[in-house]
């Protein structure tokens, strides 16, 4: 479990996420349940993006840049909802199938 916590902390830092009220961690330094669930969703999509796009850097870049297929929202912003998550996954599958430009 320790490595998962480290991975979530690294992921939140890589994405420049400010989690918790006003960017402060809880006194024990742990993520809330909601923060953990969001980070796990993002981690899953980042994993898929890395596989489709070739590496972690490209995956992170893709997640944080506006995309015309998502009405110029970032994929990261679309991950706030279940419907947005499905859109982002579908787009990555289209990219992988060669139906959409890789970027």
Image (cartoon, grey):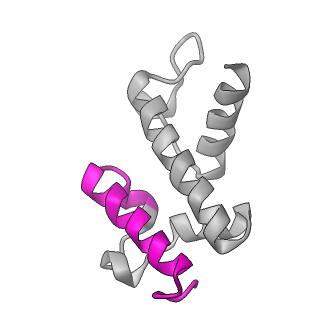
- Asked if one can make out residue 60 in the rendered structure from this viewpoint, the answer is no
Residue placed farthest to the top in the image?
A: 28
Q: Which residues are magenta?
A: 76-103
| Residue 68 % position (x, y) | 38, 84
- Number of numbered tags placed on the structure image: 0
Residue 42 vs 75, above or below: the answer is: above
- Asked if one can make out residue 61 in the rendered structure from this viewpoint, the answer is yes
Instruction: Verify whether residue 62 appears in magenta.
Output: no
| Residue 63 % position (x, y) | 53, 64
What secondary structure is the stretch in magenta mostly built from? helix
Q: Quadrant of the C terminus?
A: bottom right
Residue 41 vs 48, above or below: the answer is: above
Q: Residue at x 38, y 59 (%)?
A: 77
Residue 21, quarter of the rendered image: top left
Q: Residue at x 66, y 63 (%)?
A: 50
Q: Nearer the viewer, residue 5 or 66?
A: 5
Q: Nearer the viewer, residue 25 or 53?
A: 53
Q: Residue at x 74, y 66 (%)?
A: 55
């Amino acid at each position: 479990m320790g490595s998962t916590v480290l991975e979530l902390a690294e992921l939140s830092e890589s994405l420049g996420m400010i989690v918790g009220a006003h960017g402060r961690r809880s006194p024990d330094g742990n993520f809330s349940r909601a923060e953990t669930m969001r980070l796990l969703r993002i981690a899953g999509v980042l994993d898929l993006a890395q596989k489709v796009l070739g590496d972690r850097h490209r995956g992170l870049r893709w997640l944080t840049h506006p995309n015309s297929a998502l009405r110029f929202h970032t994929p990261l912003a679309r991950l706030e909802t279940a419907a947005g998550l499905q859109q982002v996954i579908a787009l990555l599958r289209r990219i992988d199938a060669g139906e959409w430009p890789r970027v």
